[in-house]
Each structure stands twice: as structure tokens, then as C-alpha cells.
Image (cartoon, rainbow, N blue to C red):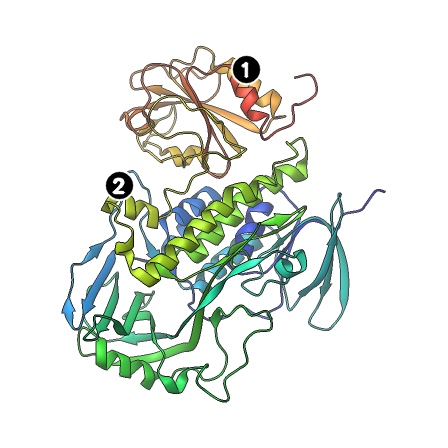
């Protein structure tokens, strides 16, 4: 039976994860509706840490500049124990990484993504709630209810649940969400202080009792604005939801996570903690918002079923250690959106959308386990060298080796199939006066075939990739310094500084890299052949007629 689709994808939830999914779908030409039951954006600075990998994603999308102008840098952390300063932690990354760590209130992240999505012709349908859905082999039927109570039935090809820790999509899909809650409660406050600590540094001050146990804690993350911080601290007994007789009952689904209703901390509650733990005498002012919050750790048993998927807090929740949560969710959405965009167009491998679970659930499992470990045992529980630990916290080591979309064989040293494609600079082009970055070549692309070397067969390989993918794989050639920039075939760039050769560990042998739309290396071939290339492309694309 033929169905008429009102849209291609429905996204439930307009937080950073849902907005990322919708924006990337729309950017790739997919019809999309994004709904959110809230009538307006919440003014809370909940998730504030922006990882370098997230900034790389925003660079690919074309909105990094807007985010950089709104954010503040995170240079490191100042730590204090019982009033004594500890070794300063500086957040230092290798020079080829294009972005550092940043802080941005969640409502600003949502504002930026919302504006970007609006420029693509799609707005958030506020006050609209997903009520139920059903799916079949061809699509998903979604029931929506507006703020007025009017109900609408929408037929879509796919549904993405980005509807948070209490996700209706997850529940309706019957996904297990195993884990538990931490007993501790915390309070959050968004305030200004008048200390003269170095700007751009977070502050972590704790008190240890005679047994060495932490019995008091203050964590401050800088926000845009003079002396402004998002502070978290332990909850005093009188504000504890668990200890109050009038405290709210637990959520119906048993998932205790996020901001609590009831009594919000006052400025005096935050000042009392600062009086005990602040490294310098200081006065808090301009309280913008505050809340008590709880933390759980849970992850779904699978990231989707059929044509329905979950992402972000709907799929995984965990301690906020290292600002991993929102950033991991944004990468969920980024991974899923380009796959659904290809699947909507057709001509793809039938397992393309299902690879989302194969690639992202192991990442979610690792993040949940690591943040729980750090929350309970401290970062010293992972005795990594500082460089590796910093790259991991920046989410630059996330990879997909072993994925069904990734070539199982890679030749040579350097980044392998399934690894993030590193950036580099010093690429010279025929017309550009200034050197280009590799990420300039990847921005606003689909799949890109990068051919390194003399390029004798570059035209044949480019033709094979284009024909097999029905025009969805572009090709660029990178040649060593001093080589010709002949433009009779695919676009040519010269590795004038040798940075590409160094970071990708290539020599004088021709080498090909197939870069996916999400900036990961799908395959590395040396020497490249049309047979090997098309065999790899068959993991994503269905061959065009006649190939």
C-alpha cells in the first residue's frame, strides 16, 4: 500500500541534540519537523562545557563562528583541597587541533542552533507534544498534540527521540534503560562573584574530613559575562528533596535525573558555601536561576528499533564529569542525521541506518562507565598519560573501528579506517592566496575521496566513486610540496608545509582516504584501486544501475 509522507523525519525534543539532528537533516535537504512540548526555551545554564570535537562538528556545519563569538574559553581548572591550592590543570591540545575547550550556557547553544535551523527554513513547533507513534516497514505514524489540545497525525519515514531522560519515544519503543541513581543531591546556581581569580579557569574546591572523605564541594564553570559562573555544590539538608516531607514524589518512570522541582536555593545558600570553600573572600550577586538536581547513570539496550531512534539523554544519562553528556548527544545526532539523509534519498545499503546503534552505543557505554568511575573514584582511576587523557576528554579519540560501515583493513601507520580525520593546515590551491585547512575541504560536504600522491589514476578513481554512489562522493587530490597543480581532473591542493603527509603518515606511494560526512575515515587504501574503492562504498551505497 502506498503512503503519502507529510515529512521525512520527525524529531521529538528541541534541546541541543534534537536541534543538531534537525539542522543537519535540513542542511542535507531532508524535510523535517521538530516538536517540543515546552512553550519556550528554558533559561537554565545546565550543560555548559563545549568540547573541541563539538566545535569541529559546528565547523563542518558552518556555524562555528557564531558559537565562538558567544562562548568563553576554558583554559583549565584551579583546584583547592581544604583551602590549599593544588597543581593547576591546563587544558592543552596538540597544535593541529583547530579548537580548544569552551563554555557556553545551554540556552545559548540552543539559541544558536535554533537560529541556524530557522535560516534553513524550519522552526521549532513549540507547545507540541508527541503523544504516540506506530511504525511499519515503510514509515512511522506519529500522533502530535498542540498546546490548544488539537491532535494531528503525521506520516514520516523516520522518528528520532531526543526527548530527554524521561523519553516517551524510548518508553513506547520498549527499550530497556538500566542503571541507578546516585544518592547525593546537588544544587546549581548561576551567579556573579567579585574574586580576582584568573579568567577562563574553572574552580574546584573541596573539603576532606579526618578520614579523607569529601564532605563539602564547590565546582564553578566560567560563563560569558564579567565574574559569572555556573556553580554546583552539595545540598544542605533543608533543601534536600529526599529529606523534606513536602518534597516531590519520584518521577513515574523511576528515572531520577536532572533538575528537581520544589524549593530552589537562594543566593544566601550559595553564599554560605562560598564562605566555606571559596579560594578568596568573595560576594555572590545577580542570581539568575538556581535549582536542586539529581544524577543517575543509565543506558539503553539499543539505540533504535526499525525506523525509530533515540539520541542524547533519551539514550544515555550519567554524571556531568568532564562535560561529556550534551557533547556525546550532539555526536549521536550528527552520526544519525547524515545516514538518514542518505537513506531518505535512496540507493543505500539496507543496513545504513542500523549502523547508528553499532557505532554510537559502544561510545555511550564507554562514556557512562568512565564518568561514573571518575565521579566515584576521581580522574586518577584512569592512569593515562596527560596527552591521551586530554584528547579523550576533548572527545577527539572517539572512533568507529570495527563498524559495519568501516573498511576492516587499513595499510600503514597514522590514522586508520574508523578514526577521526585530523585537521591540518598549509594546503595551497591555485587561486587561494592564503593556505587552507583540510577542514575547509570537508566543510559542507558529503563523502569525500582524498587522493594523495602523483594522481595518475585520480580521474579513474573519481569516476568510479561518483558512478557507484550516484554522484554522492566528491574527490580532491592532495599532492606533495612542489608538485604540479594541474586542474584537468579533480580539484588539486598542494601539501605545501608537509602537514598532511606528517599527520596522515603517508609517503611517496599513492594513498586514498574515503572521508565520511561526519569527518571520520571510512577507508584507507594504499595503493588505491577502483575495485577496492567500490567494494568499500558498497557498505554504504547500493550500486547504481550498470555498475
Q: Which residue is mark 1?
A: 531
Secondary structure at badge 2 equals loop
Mark 1–mark 2 CB contact (< 8 Å)? no
Secondary structure at badge 1 equals helix
Q: Residue furthest front?
A: 211
Q: Residue at x 72, y 73 (%)?
A: 148
Q: Which residue is mark 2?
A: 94
Q: Vertical placement of 31 versus 412: above or below?
A: below
Q: Tell me residue 460's x, y (percent).
A: 53, 13
Q: Residue furthest bottom?
A: 245
| Badge number at residue 405 | none
Q: Residue at x 28, y 82 (%)?
A: 271
Which sits in the foreground, 44 or 526? 526
Q: Residue at x 48, y 65 (%)?
A: 180
Disc count in the image? 2
The Cα atoms of the two marked residues, 1 and 2, are separated by: 36 Å
Q: Tell me residue 399's x, y (percent).
A: 43, 39
Q: Quadrant of the N terminus?
A: top right
User: Label 1 crowding class (10 Å Cα cut-off): few <14, some 14-19, many 20+?
Assistant: few
Q: Tell me residue 455's x, y (percent).
A: 42, 14
Q: Tell me residue 383's x, y (percent).
A: 25, 49
Amino acid at each position: 500500500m502506498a503512503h503519502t509522507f507529510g515529512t521525512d523525519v520527525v524529531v521529538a525534543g528541541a534541546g541541543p541534540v534534537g536541534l543538531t539532528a534537525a539542522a543537519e537533516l535540513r542542511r542535507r535537504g531532508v524535510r523535517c519537523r521538530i516538536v517540543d512540548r515546552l512553550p519556550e526555551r528554558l533559561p537554565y545554564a545546565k550543560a555548559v562545557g563545549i568540547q573541541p570535537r563539538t566545535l569541529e562538528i559546528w565547523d563542518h556545519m558552518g556555524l562555528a563562528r557564531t558559537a565562538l563569538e558567544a562562548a568563553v574559553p576554558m583554559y583549565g581548572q584551579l583546584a583547592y583541597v581544604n583551602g590549599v591550592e593544588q597543581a593547576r590543570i591546563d587544558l592543552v591540545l596538540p597544535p593541529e587541533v583547530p579548537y580548544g575547550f569552551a563554555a557556553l550556557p545551554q540556552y545559548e547553544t540552543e539559541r544558536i542552533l535554533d537560529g541556524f535551523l530557522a535560516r534553513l527554513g524550519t522552526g521549532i513547533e513549540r507547545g507540541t507534544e508527541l503523544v504516540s507513534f506506530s511504525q511499519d516497514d515503510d514509515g512511522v505514524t506519529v500522533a502530535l498534540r498542540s498546546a490548544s489540545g488539537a491532535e494531528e497525525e503525521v506520516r514520516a519515514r523516520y522518528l528520532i527521540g531526543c526527548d530527554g531522560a524521561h523519553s516517551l519515544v524510548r518508553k513506547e519503543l520498549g527499550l530497556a534503560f538500566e542503571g541507578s541513581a546516585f544518592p547525593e543531591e546537588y544544587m546549581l546556581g548561576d551567579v556573579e562573584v567579585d574574586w580576582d581569580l584568573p579568567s577562563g579557569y574553572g574552580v574546584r574546591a573541596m573539603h576532606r574530613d579526618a578520614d579523607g572523605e569529601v564532605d563539602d564541594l564547590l565546582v564553578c564553570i566560567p560563563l560569558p559575562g564579567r565574574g559569572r559562573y555556573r556553580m554546583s555544590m552539595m545540598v544542605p539538608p533543608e533543601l534536600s528533596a529526599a529529606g523534606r516531607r513536602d518534597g516531590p514524589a519520584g518521577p513515574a518512570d523511576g528515572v531520577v535525573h536532572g533538575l528537581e522541582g520544589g524549593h530552589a536555593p537562594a543566593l544566601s545558600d550559595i553564599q554560605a558555601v562560598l564562605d566555606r570553600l571559596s579560594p578568596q573572600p568573595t560576594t555572590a550577586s545577580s542570581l539568575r536561576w538556581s535549582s536542586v538536581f539529581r544524577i543517575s547513570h543509565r543506558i539503553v539496550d539499543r539505540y533504535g528499533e526499525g525506523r525509530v531512534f533515540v539520541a542524547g539523554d533519551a539514550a544515555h544519562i550519567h554524571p556531568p564529569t568532564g562535560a561529556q553528556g550534551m557533547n556525546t548527544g550532539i555526536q549521536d545526532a550528527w552520526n544519525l542525521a547524515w545516514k538518514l539523509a542518505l537513506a531518505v534519498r535512496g540507493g543505500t545499503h539496507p543496513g545504513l541506518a542500523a549502523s547508528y546503534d553499532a557505532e554510537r552505543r559502544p561510545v555511550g557505554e564507554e562514556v557512562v562507565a568512565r564518568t561514573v568511575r571518575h565521579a566515584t573514584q576521581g580522574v586518577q582511576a584512569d592512569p593515562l598519560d596527560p596527552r591521551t587523557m586530554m584528547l579523550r576528554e576533548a572527545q577527539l579519540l572517539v572512533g568507529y573501528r570495527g563498524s559495519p560501515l568501516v573498511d576492516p583493513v587499513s595499510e600503514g601507520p597514522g590514522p586508520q579506517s574508523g578514526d577521526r580525520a585530523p585537521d591540518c593546515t598549509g594546503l595551497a590551491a591555485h587561486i587561494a592566496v592564503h593556505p587552507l585547512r583540510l577542514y575547509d575541504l570537508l566543510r559542507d560536504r558529503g563523502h569525500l575521496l582524498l587522493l594523495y600522491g602523483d594522481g595518475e589514476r585520480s580521474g579513474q578513481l573519481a569516476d568510479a566513486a561518483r558512478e557507484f554512489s550516484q554522484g554522492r562522493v566528491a574527490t580532491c587530490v592532495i599532492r606533495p610540496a612542489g608538485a604540479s597543480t594541474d586542474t584537468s581532473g579533480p580539484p588539486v591542493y598542494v601539501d605545501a608545509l608537509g602537514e598532511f603527509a606528517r599527520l596522515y603518515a603517508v609517503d611517496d606511494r599513492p594513498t586514498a582516504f574515503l572521508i565520511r560526512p561526519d569527518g571520520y575515515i571510512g577507508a584507507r587504501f594504499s595503493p588505491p584501486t577502483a575495485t577496492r574503492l567500490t567494494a568499500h562504498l558498497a557498505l554504504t551505497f547500493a550500486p547504481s544501475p550498470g555498475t
